[in-house]
Image (spheres, rainbow, N blue to C red):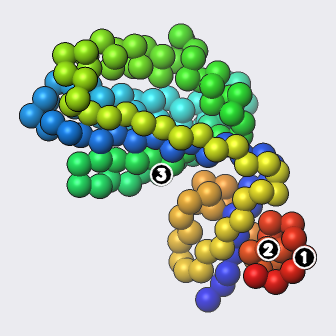
Amino acid sequence: MDRVTHAYDGPLTVFLIGLRVHKPWKVGIVRQAAAAMPRMIVELERNKAAAERGEAEHLGYLGSRSTVHLMATTMVQWWRSVEELYAYANAVDHLHRPAWTEFYRVAKADPGAVTIWHETYTVPAHGAESIYSGPKPLGLASIAGTIPVGRRGETARQRLGGTTTA
């Protein structure tokens, strides 16, 4: 079985964002909170494709993956930089800012109905390590492509720039 690692090279911002439903009977609040993210991802994916064709300025979004839990969802997003993530989040001409404002307006009716959360991690160039063995990689490699493990190092420590074995 081939072992590969992600092909992405450069600094990276990893953004985790999630929704946890506490009161599923508060349908209006839950629906508003849950419906916003898919629309934003469509906007970001369209921009990424247009930027790759040279038709738009790249917003910095590289891709995302979601997981669904019993009463919650978590999305992992990869961005080129935290500055580009923040620029998108605060831009009035993109979907995030209006969705954020609308969420707070709707959530005032019952602040305990849902929790929206996020965490942001900045990763310096050569600060991300990965390995995938199997027919279809997940995570960063699924959006950035793969290269053979040996090109970055046979051990995790080597792939992170160290010289000792893991």
Q: Give the amino acid type for the residue marked by disc 2 in the picture.
A: Arg
> Mark 1 to mark 3: distance in Å?
32 Å
Which type of secondary structure does the marked residue at label 1 adopt?
loop
Indicate the position of residue 34 as horizontal and vertical percent values: 29, 34
Mark 2 in CB contact with mark 1 (< 8 angstroms): yes
Q: Name the residue under label 2.
A: 157
Residue located farthest toward the front when viewing the structure as drawn: 112
Which dot, 3 or 2, sits closer to the camera?
2
Q: Crowdedness of circle 1 by 10 Å Cα count: few (<14), some, many (20+)?
A: few
**Does residue 69 sit above or below 156 in this rendering?**
above
Indicate the position of residue 48 as horizontal and vertical percent values: 61, 36
Q: In this view, does 13 lie to the left or right of 96?
A: right
Indicate the position of residue 47 as horizontal and vertical percent values: 59, 30
- Say which label, 1 or 3, has the lower sequence index: 3
**Does residue 55 sit above or below 140 in this rendering?**
above
Quarter of the image containing the N terminus? bottom right
Q: Give the amino acid type for the residue marked by disc 3 in the picture.
A: Arg
Which type of secondary structure does the marked residue at label 2 adopt?
helix
The residue sitting at 40% across, 41% down in the picture is: 18
Q: Crowdedness of circle 3 by 10 Å Cα count: few (<14), some, many (20+)?
A: some
What number is the disc on residue 65?
3
> Mark 2 to mark 1: distance in Å?
7 Å
Q: Name the residue under label 1.
A: 163
